[in-house]
Image (spheres, coloured by chain):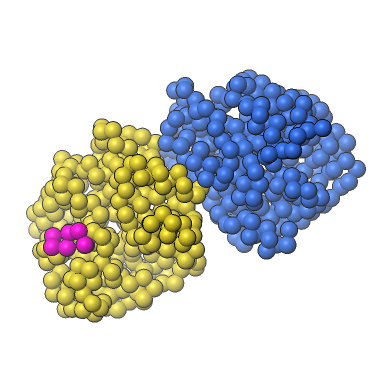
Chain colours: A blue, B yellow
Amino acid sequence: MSAPASLDVTGIGNAIVDIIAQTDDAFLTAHAIAKGGMTLIDAAAATRLYGIMGPGVETSGGSAANTIAGIAALGGRAGFIGKVQQDQLGEVFAHDLRALGVQYDTPASISESPTGRCLILVTPDAQRSMSTFLGAGQELRPEDVDPARIAAAQITYLEGYLWDPPGAKQAFRKAMDIAHQAGRRVAMSLSDAFCVERYRDEFQHLAAGNIDILFANETEIMSLYQARTFDDALQAVRGKCALAALTRSEKGCVILAGGEVHVIEAVKPVALIDTTGAGDLFAAGFLFGLTHGRDVAACARIGALAASEVLAHLGPRPQSDMKALLKKSGL
Amino acid sequence: MSAPASLDVTGIGNAIVDIIAQTDDAFLTAHAIAKGGMTLIDAAAATRLYGIMGPGVETSGGSAANTIAGIAALGGRAGFIGKVQQDQLGEVFAHDLRALGVQYDTPASISESPTGRCLILVTPDAQRSMSTFLGAGQELRPEDVDPARIAAAQITYLEGYLWDPPGAKQAFRKAMDIAHQAGRRVAMSLSDAFCVERYRDEFQHLAAGNIDILFANETEIMSLYQARTFDDALQAVRGKCALAALTRSEKGCVILAGGEVHVIEAVKPVALIDTTGAGDLFAAGFLFGLTHGRDVAACARIGALAASEVLAHLGPRPQSDMKALLKKSGL
């Protein structure tokens, strides 16, 4: 039906540079930052928060972009679509993807808005609390979605975080249509409980129709179906989506694939430093497996392994040789 | 003689953001990058190298700036003088110093030159090889040296790296004069063997006259006196400079203080990841001790401890609670 895919996965999401600083719980409380969550802030609030937060480490971030970077690091063929400004942080973002061999050539924004940044505060328990100024990232438009790049990929991966500005929503809808018309699959992450709160009906609709592979963590899936327990959410999603990967941090994950259910353990990281990007890298490992002919249980194990790598250091992108790690783990 | 100092140390140096990527020895060889050294490159070469190097992590750097950040992290009162551009990397550099409580308000450059950056390639043996585009950093001028900030500090610390552009040299000379007229001390690092090669006569002259506290590693001090062995260099510097701290990586350091000689062990890091900034942090610990009334042997031990912290992670600035580390070590 469809031509052989020249890419494994094309991701669409916010193009973000992370600024990561270590802090304590008192700082989060004093500045009303929701621990473990993601809050959108405007330029003024970003300047204010940056002014009071500690010294930082900068790394390219963005949820879907982290996933795409992870897939490339594992040896997959990947592309990305997302919007930066022509500024220094934009250059860093583009460099870090291209240096991994990711196909990335979305035209930079010509508006005044700078490249998006995410101010991440990491507490001693390794939990990350994110305050994001989306900047140019939210200017994604349908015309930025290159039909060839979508049709060329086995899977198009979308982050729920970008399901907000009308132009980006249209871009997502366009990408879903192109992918399905080309006989490809669409994957999406619910991203954060606040996204689910805001777009519950739309996300329920997407999960039951347009999305072939759904990624959600425990909080997100419970919020999506307003379930009281994880098992209630599990029963609610079962049968609605062809393939759902539900992650539960150190409790591992549950995979629903048609009639099959798999319960897979987490991989303990060598150190627990920073949870930023753990979910993104789970998705990377899972999608890498899926596009390389692995069964869903093996996909989940690769996801858990990839997540464990980024838990062990500051920042959401792998710092180890992921191909070697995969080999060593017998996966 | 002099008024009580409101600052422990004021540093003057290049204002640089580090872009750190892991690589292998083959890459260094293929691109003729001198392993373990620091090479100055122009904007075009920086763009070229950045284009081919792997994904990176960005952190504020600059040799003297790292030392100043380390002193502040240890609980010292510190100031910095150095030149950035009004761009995103300049903002990151200023933020990271100010977030540590460092007094830093050198006016940003108004030239076209962007904020300086150092492309650092770290090999699996933890050695760092640096290619630096100085950018706005080298535009330091005598008028940037605030006399009050120099006179207020017990010690003014200079990095040899900046002993190159005529304006910056004049700025260094001005700072030395102000410090000495105020009854303060001047410290300087020889920074790198290539600096010593280039300015051997001037550095010998400085070491024998204008500098009260000299920092050099084994290679640098041997180059300064064109000595065949470390001991030859030791004999050459002895008696020329009031206080000299000669570092030898894992072999520890030798301190010459008037007639005294101390041989102090290195502190083994919990992991050996990246040597970037190890010398800078040795100087930070040493100067922190010196400005807090410690004897020179204790100063060297604090220096070795501070160096061990930055060896254990990517990047030249502390990521642990340095005050707690100091306390735990009984120093």
Residue B12 vs residue A291, the one in the foreground: A291
Q: Whole-percent x and y of residue B20?
A: 44, 51
Residue B201 falls within the magenta-colored stretch: yes
Residue for point 40% across, 44% down: B48
Residue A269 falls within the magenta-colored stretch: no
In the rendered view, would you say A212 is above or below A70?
Answer: above
Residue for point 37% across, 49% down: B118
Q: Whole-percent x and y of residue A261?
A: 86, 47
Q: Whole-percent x and y of residue B195?
A: 23, 58
Residue for point 88% across, 46% down: A260
Identify the magenta region.
B196-202
In the rendered view, would you say A68 is above or below A197?
Answer: below
| Image quadrant containing the C terminus of chain A | bottom right
Q: How many marks?
A: 0
Task: Let me know if residue B312 appears in the view.
Answer: no
Q: Whole-percent x and y of residue A291?
A: 74, 44
| Side (left or right) of A142 relative to A43 | right
Task: Let me know if residue A291 appears in the view.
Answer: yes
Residue A100 vs residue B275, the one in the foreground: A100
| Side (left or right) of B153 relative to B55 | left
| Image quadrant containing the N terminus of chain A | top right
The image quarter in which residue B94 lies = top left
Q: Residue furthest right?
A: A259
What type of secondary structure mainly makes up the magenta span?
Answer: helix
Residue for point 49% across, 25% down: A109
| Side (left or right) of B81 relative to B212 | right
